[in-house]
Amino acid sequence: MTILVTGATGHVGRAVVDALVAAGQDVRASSRDAAKLDVPDGVAKVNADLEDPSTLEPALDGVESVFLYTQRQGIDGFVKAAEGAGVRHVVLLSSGATLEPQSAQSRIARLHRVVEEALIAAPFAETLLNPGSFATNTLGWRRDVAEGVVRTPYPDSRVGAIHERDIGDVAAKILADGSHAGQALQLSGPEPISFREQAAVLADVLGRPLRVEELTPEQAAERMTALGWPPEVPPEVLRAIERTTREPSVVTGVVREVTGHAPRTFRQWAEEHRADFS
């Protein structure tokens, strides 16, 4: 069985590739520019761009299962190409935001939901992975950490930060055995952990102090917009973060249920990513 992993240059996509290779699966990794892929030996590399349907047929040839990143543009073409190729199962990296009541869903949730609905309506099986906060979000602190500070809004918000390798392990298990078809799985790390606590863990792992500086929502939105976020998105994200100062993010047992191992802690993530902050 050949499994296609789209977006294999991303943190989660690469984690899926690694988990599948470790399980002895036949893996095909894809990116818009396959030449930029850095994957283990024996993993085939192909170009695949949802916005360029001509790339999808060769990428999907002989593929039975697909790990898919959420991208609204081109999803209809992907569904058509996957159906034509005889794909049996697609595992989608979606967002925990889509599990909110529909009336409260943000623009981000609605964009993800469009892709979810396209897969649900497709003739092949789908599994939706709905993680909340990613531990890799902390990589956005690198420039500040170099100055000995962590600048963040709502430092006492509590999120269930999940290690990308846990998402990769869940996706790989489902891709390999075809389980959890038709299900939406809410993924999380092992505990709600505040940004302040993440900064303390990171400081301990790096062996140097890190001062926490609280940003106002306006300052945080300005920084996010400067990084290329559409201006209407930061306020929605910040409202969701603010809510976790009062209602900590939900923690689930899905990682353990699917993989058989406990989700990795934020400290494990920080230790593995120490070099990223050097």
Image: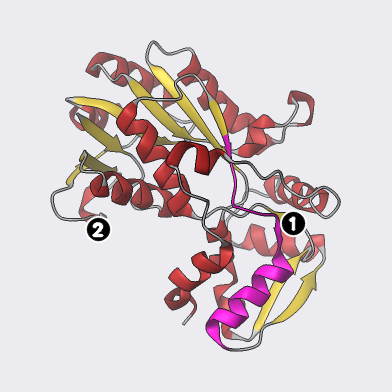
Residue at (64%, 30%) from the top-left corner?
110
**Does 156 appear above or below 45?**
below
Q: Does 38 sit left or right of 201 as displayed? A: left
Residue at (61%, 53%) from the top-left corner?
190
Q: Residue furthest left?
A: 42
Q: Position of residue 103 (x, y in %)?
A: 79, 25
Q: Residue furthest front?
A: 260
Residue at (15%, 55%) from the top-left corner?
41
Location of mark 2 (residue):
38
- Closer to us: 83 or 100: 100
Q: Position of residue 90 (x, y in %)?
A: 38, 26
For the residue carrying disc 2, how many other residues have a C-alpha within 10 Å: few (<14), some (14-19), or many (20+)? few
**Which kind of residue does numbered mark 2 sit on?**
Asp
Q: Position of residue 32 (x, y in %)?
A: 30, 44
* Res 155 → quadrant: bottom right
Tell me the magenta residue range: 186-207
Location of mark 1 (residue):
158
**Does 30 appear above or below 159?**
above
Mark 2 or mark 1, whichever is nearer to me: 1
Numbered badge on residue 175:
none
Instruction: Say what secondary structure mark 2 lies in.
Output: loop
Q: Does residue 199 belong to the magenta stretch?
A: yes
Q: Does residue 109 belong to the magenta stretch?
A: no
Residue 51 seen from this side: no
For the residue carrying disc 1, how many other residues have a C-alpha within 10 Å: few (<14), some (14-19), or many (20+)? many
Q: Quadrant of the N terminus?
A: top left
Residue 92 seen from this side: yes
